[in-house]
Image (cartoon, rainbow, N blue to C red):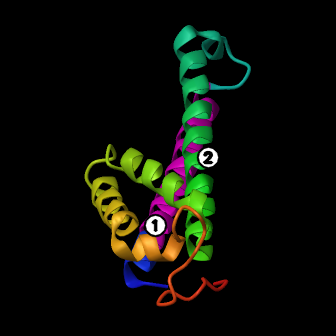
Amino acid sequence: MPDSIKTTRLCLVVAAGLEIATAALFLFIFLSGAVLIGWGTERSGLLGSALLGATGILLTVLFAAFGVADLLIAAGIAKGRPWSRVAGMVMSVLLLIAVPVGTVLGIFALKGLQGPDARAWFGSPNGARPESCPPPTAV
């Protein structure tokens, strides 16, 4: 596996770890808020409490889904799957929004997925690999 592909895969795995950790943090924050407000009290029926609870669940699910998607894409990149290159580029562009750490990870991942090593690693559109690039092995 070329070094640029290893770097891209590592960036996506780190991003996945950060996204899953963020999901766990949101879950903790919103569950502890629900416990402090009280499950069956009068305050739990207020509009703000309901909106915060729904927002917390939505953010937790969203960050966890992005983390799992990043891990699946990183596994596809390690195996040289052509779909993972496109999916990796999409996720890298989405990472650019997460200033500052996501931006750095997204830039490195995009750089690795657009170079000549990536074209050789993922093969040409017709599926043929050059002789200089051996087929990917399972990691």
Q: How many marks?
A: 2
Q: Nearer the viewer, residue 54 or 80?
A: 80
**Residue 13 higher or lower than 60, as above or below:** below
The x, y position of residue 20, in whole percent, is 56, 55
Q: Main secondary structure of the magenta part?
A: helix
**Residue 77 higher or lower than 110, as above or below:** below
Q: Nearer the viewer, residue 47 or 92?
A: 92
Q: Which residues are magenta?
A: 9-37
**Residue 58 higher or lower than 44, as above or below:** below
Residue drawn at point x = 58 percent, y = 9 percent = 46
Which of the labelled discs sits on residue 65, or is there none?
Answer: 2
Horizontal side of residue 137 vs 7, given as left or right: right
Judge whether residue 99 can be spotted in this image: yes
The x, y position of residue 3, in whole percent, is 39, 84
Q: Mark 2 Cα within 10 Å, few/some/many (few <14, many 20+)?
A: some
**Badge 1 is on which residue?**
14
Q: Nearer the viewer, residue 34 or 17?
A: 17
Horizontal side of residue 104 vs 93, given as left or right: left
At label 2, which amino acid type do we have? Answer: Ala
At label 1, which amino acid type do we have? Answer: Val
In 3D space, how far apart are the residues under numbered discs 1 and 2 (Cα atoms)? 15 Å
Which of the labelled discs sits on residue 32, or is there none?
Answer: none
Considering the numbered disc 2 on the image, is that residue within a helix, a strand or a loop?
helix
- Determine which quarter of the picture holds residue 116: bottom left
Judge whether residue 83 is colored magenta. no
Considering the numbered disc 1 on the image, is that residue within a helix, a strand or a loop?
helix
Q: Mark 1 Cα within 10 Å, few/some/many (few <14, many 20+)?
A: some
- Determine which quarter of the picture holds residue 55: top right
Residue drawn at point x = 54 percent, y = 36 percent = 59
The x, y position of residue 36, in whole percent, is 58, 32
